[in-house]
Amino acid sequence: MENTVGYIPFLLLGILLYTSVLTFPSVRSNGFRSRFSPLVPIVSFFYFLFGFDGSVQTTTVWDHSLLPISITFQIDGLSRLFALLITGIGSLIFIYANGYMKGAKYVQRLQCFLLLFMLAMLGVVLSDDLILLFIFWELTSISSFFLIGFKNEDEASRQSALQAITITGMGGLIMLGGFIILGEIAGTYSISSMSSPEIISQITSHGWFVPMLILILVGAFTKSAQFPFHFWLPGAMKAPTPVSAYLHSATMVKAGVYLLARFSPVLGDTPVWNIALISFGGVTMVYAAFQSLFRTDMKSILAYTTVSALGIMVFLLGLQSSDAIAAVSLFILVHALYKASFFMLAGTIDHETGTRDISQLGGLGKVMMPLFAIGILAAWSNGGIPPSVGFLGKDLIYESTLHHPAWAYVFTGLSVGTNIMLFAAGLLVGWLPFRGTRSHPSVTLPHWSLWVPALLLALLGMIFGLFPSIINNGLINPVADAIAGTEQNIHLKLWHGFNTVFYLSLITMGVGFLLYNLIRPGAKLLSFIESAEHWGPKRILHALANEFVGVSSWITMTLQNGKLRIYLLVILGFLVSLLGYVVLSDTNFVIDKEQLTNITIYEGITVGILFISVFLTLFSGSRLAAVAAMGVVGYTLCIIFVFYSAPDLAMTQFTIDTLTVILFVLVLYRLPRFIRLDFSARHILDGIVAISVGALMTVISLEVLQRTPEREISDFYALNAYVMAKGKNVVNVILVDFRGADTMIEIVVLTIAAIGVYSLLKLRLRKNEKME
């Protein structure tokens, strides 16, 4: 197939441009542009569907010879599957959102955030550079913050968004540390380049391998809501249902799973990797599945089952066997199909009835037959009932645990128990609201956009189960190849005969249905479960966060208290401590007096005038005299620069000191009356710090004179100033050309400071106001 990966940067740029178009105000109604928003993910979906065949393709947009990073995109089986889920489910979510949010405020804003999130997720799964991946990773956290907190007038939504970005954002920063260590160990930041056996051996045998791996795992676990970081995901259910259906079924929460799968060939199959993933994934899948049984809100049930499913994926990646790799490759697709259907189903029921509480819903199947069908099909796939594709996924999970060499019975028991609870939870959402007495007599079938997208996904779950060959070679096998790092031969089929796995599936369905009939969530049971979580991970992490805020506030109020003297003491004190330690610990530091020239009479007189001026500045009883003496200090420095053949520096210093003196004199009349202060311990401390800084700078200057100068950089500028920049003044060329960006930023900073100063000078307060 033709290499089409080169179009990926243009696709991402196109999504970004259309996102910016959505933000522009328009004389037309919001609905005009909103109706066309599904076209962007639809076009992207067909590009990834027909433009690639699972083979590895790479394109480099930018590469710097002096930097270890590059803008490189790569697509293989794993990234293609995620790209199809991101764009395919995204297309249906946009159609669903148009119907769900019809008549609501800020519809374009929601779609803008959704497109920005889709762009970020595509960047995550397509990046082949660690730093580029991190940038898109953090962009998913930022865009999801806006999506989760979309109902910004609601305090609970704002708190949920803040909680989500705190957990995932901090995890991302910790992960960045792991990425940097990994890149330095491997000698490259290219992910695909790390897959060679030599580099893998170099990474896994390095002394920093375990700390690096822990940092990366923290980032993955926080994003994919693994215990004990899981609580942000149920809290994120405050978001509108289209957001929940998109972020928490196939995209954001699976970013951590994608990261683990991507690095599995490089970091996997090591004791630390296996133990960490099996432990955290196993605890997460059992704990969250148990929690889902006692919830009454449909989205809350789906949130905990999502956390459990993510735990299953992490658990399978920890097993590292061929069966486990096949299971996780298929389960990523299976979960995305039925969970997105479930979320859209819950949102539509809420949209039409005004509630998501399963204890208040019933009999809806009599008037909402399409939704009832969606619930049955999604629950069918969720429970692993044949002939759904969920049945194939569950069988592969049991195959992988049964074949474990050491813990087969334990792992199989945990998997069966988890699937039993998930089976019952799926029936609570997909079956219970449609059976029994009709709870809302006035409800009718909603608009097609509120149920057709979910029905399409639910039907795909059955089609792929009946005809697994559709996805076997073209989709699932390339995913397994990418995760394993070697070629895998997976043969998906619906019927494997009467064997242990089949009997385990029967047990799962039978016990799961029995559990569904025994448990009826209610307010009393929910209150008991929530009270038991009083000392759970959420409360502990919140307490730690509050302590962190308290300590930060104390440090800020102590060191950043608005007093310039304290700022200078902290900065200069730290500088003296750090540089003093470096100088004193340098055993090679020796001042050779023979290399120092004799002091001339001109230099002596100049320095003497400088000392007298400093003394007058400190002890003068007149402010004007102190300003004049301070100006003399600057002029003596100008003379010293002239002595040592630096007339340009002397002229610069002369200009600055002259302007400083003039400005001081101009503002003297606005300052309070000059007060002569008596010396105190505070002034003694100021003097000690000032003398220490001066002494340290003197010692460092003398040490520099003893060293042989390194002229590589200065020679480069001298040789290339005219050749490359056509300038004869080397200093000017450095400022304007070689370091032009630095100069421009400095000018911007000075301009902002000048505007601030001008604003303060022009400030006129009312009589009843005062400057704080």
Image (cartoon, rainbow, N blue to C red):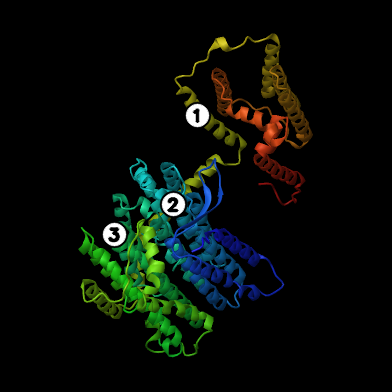
Above-or-below relation of 77 to 297 = above
Q: Is residue 238 visible?
A: no
The part of the image, by quadrant, that contains residue 293 is bottom left
Q: Nearer the viewer, residue 363 or 205?
A: 205
Q: Amino acid at mark 3?
A: Ser
Label 2 – label 3 distance at C-alpha: 22 Å
Label 1 – label 2 distance at C-alpha: 44 Å
Disc 2 marks which residue?
A: 192
The reply to whether callout 2 and callout 3 are in contact (CB within 8 Å) is no
The nearer-to-camera label among 1 and 2 is 2
Left or right: residue 235 versus residue 396 is right
Kindly identify which numbered label has been placed on residue 321.
3
Question: Residue 148: x, y in percent?
Answer: 51, 65
Q: Amino acid at mark 1?
A: Ser
Q: Nearer the viewer, residue 63 or 258?
A: 63
Q: Nearer the viewer, residue 101 or 455?
A: 455
Disc 1 marks which residue?
A: 577
